[in-house]
Each structure stands twice: as C-alpha cells, then as structure tokens.
Amino acid sequence: MKKLLFASLLLMSLSAMAQELEPKGKIKDPQKVKDKMHNAFLSKRMALTASQRDSLYALTIAYAKDTTERGIQYRDLDARFNELTKKHNDLEEKHKKLDQDFIDMNDKYTTLIRTSLNKTEQLNLALKEKGEQLLERERKLAVLEGLIREQDSITNALNNVIKKALLSFKSDEISVEMKNGKVYVSMSDKLLFKSGSAEVEEKGLDALKKLAEVLNKNKDVGVMIEGHTDNVPIKTAQFKDNWDLSVARATNIVRMLDEVHKVDAKNLTAAGRGEYMPKASNETPEGRAKNRRTEIILSPKLDELYKLINKN
C-alpha cells in the first residue's frame, strides 16, 4: 500500500512538473522535461532512503538501551545468588561479546549506508536478523526471570512451613525470616545450649526434631548450620576459644540431624563463625544475648538456574 501511495504521489508530482514546463505560447524542451523528471525521481528516492536510515538508527538506539537494562537485571542476579558469582561473570562476558558483535554489526550498517544507498533490501535483511537476536535475548531473560520467580515462590512456601512448624516456641527463642532468597532460622543459646557447652538441651532437641521433619519433606534444600558467639573470651579444657565452641555446636547439630533424624547428609554443612558475625552490639547484655545463637540457613537448590546459565 505504501509503495502504491508513493508511486501515485510521484506520478502526480511529475505531471505537475510537466505542466510547469509547458507554459502557454512556448515550445516544449523534451530534454529539460526529462532532466526535471529524473531529478525529481532521485530526490524522492533519496528522501525514502534517508527515512529508512533514520528508522534503523532509532531501532539501534532502542536496542542499546535495552541491552543496558538487561545488563542491570543480570547484575541483580549476582547480588541475590552469591553462589552464582562465577557463573554470572561468565554470563557477563557473553553479554560483552554480544555487545561487541552489536558494535561490529552497526559499523557494517553504517558502511553499507554510506557506500550503497540503493541496497535497501540488504539493510532490511540485516534489520530482520537484528530483531531476531533481540527476541532471542528477551526469551532467555524471560526464562531466567521465570526461574527466579519460581525459586522465590519455593523459598516463601518453605518460610511459611518452617514458621508453622516452630510456632510453639517464643520469639526470643526462635526467629524465622527470608533474606537474599534464603530462609534463616535463628535459635538462641538459651534454647539450645548451656553456657560453654556444645550439648543440645531438651527443649532444643524438640525444636531440631520439628525442623528435621520439615527438611525430610523438602529434600531439595541445602542446610547450612552456623554457630555464633558473643565476644566474651572463653577457654576451657574442651574448647580453646569462642571459635572452637561455635564449630563444635554447629557440628553437633549437623550430626544430630543426620544420625538421629535422618536428614540427607549431602545437604548439610557445618560452620563456626565465633564472634565475627554479630547480630547486635556486644556492648550490652541484651546485644550479647542476641549474638549467642545458632543460625540454620535453608537454601532451595538452584540446579535448573545453573544449567540454564551454563547453556546460554
């Protein structure tokens, strides 16, 4: 339709020009008419080509903006999933290569426009390929975003199940919260241990049992047990310092989950943090009490997300 309209307008313009070249009482100059018509045709064609070039430039700017926005989305993944740092860097390298490919292709477009204005068909083909690349990137990003939403949904459901299972305990004994795509179960020392001891108390055994029941129903969850202390020095025949004590406490809980409650040992990790990751200030008794804790960090596995990033 656009080509038909353009042809009609060109025909009308040429007809009007021909009439101007035939003033009353004068003899027509065929060569002059022919030159005028040729120049008008070239002017129309150059205007059309310039319009197509401007449209291509606008699409290039939009693509560059989209590339920047998508790069930010990938960097957000790095903040949310520390485990994906290396894989995310690999993905960024692929993005940089794609950006360089885009620059190279844009240079080819510019050269093509400058050297061959009549090769519009080649430009249209290149533009089509560019659009297909953009659509493919958007498809991959949509898949990644879908996986992230799915992981968030799983984490949220796990958080609700854990809270319900531990509802009978007081808030100063156990707290449950979601953070960075994980569920953090913080158990105070007064629930689990006596001062300077790594042996779990009776009430703590009940809490661990209820937690283990949830873990045994949700086997695709990584479990990190972290022991934490305040900064008051300790040195006993059994424990050299706070760090030693925090490691022993975390290890005992891991062994209990494995040997007593049959939680899959492949999903369990023990870590002692000592006094070096305080939750509150150690300057007050209340702050030190908050710091004496065991944190059980639950991480839904991200195998599908890993596979997708490696693939792309």
Image (cartoon, rainbow, N blue to C red):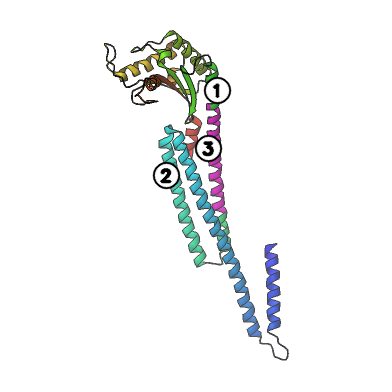
Q: Residues within 10 Å of mark 3 (few under 14, many from 20)?
A: some
Is 6 above or below relative to 260?
below
Q: Residue at x 46, y 14 (%)?
A: 208
Q: Residues within 10 Å of mark 1 (few under 14, many from 20)?
A: some
Q: CA distance from mark 3 to mark 1?
A: 24 Å
> Magenta residues?
128-155
Is tag 1's residue or tag 2's residue first in the polypeptide sequence? 2
For the residue marked with disc 3, what is the amino acid?
Leu
Question: Quick check: 168 left or right of 26?
Answer: left
For the residue marked with disc 1, what is the amino acid?
Asn
Q: Position of residue 65 (x, y in %)?
A: 51, 51
Q: Judge whether residue 249 can be spotted in this image.
A: yes
Residue ID for mark 1:
160
Residue ID for mark 2:
93
**Number of marks in picture:** 3
Q: Residue at x 60, y 66 (%)?
A: 48
The secondary element bearing badge 2 is classed as helix
Is 67 above or below relative to 161?
below
Q: Position of residue 301 (x, y in %)?
A: 48, 27
The secondary element bearing badge 3 is classed as helix
Residue ID for mark 3:
144
Q: Position of residue 50 (x, y in %)?
A: 57, 66
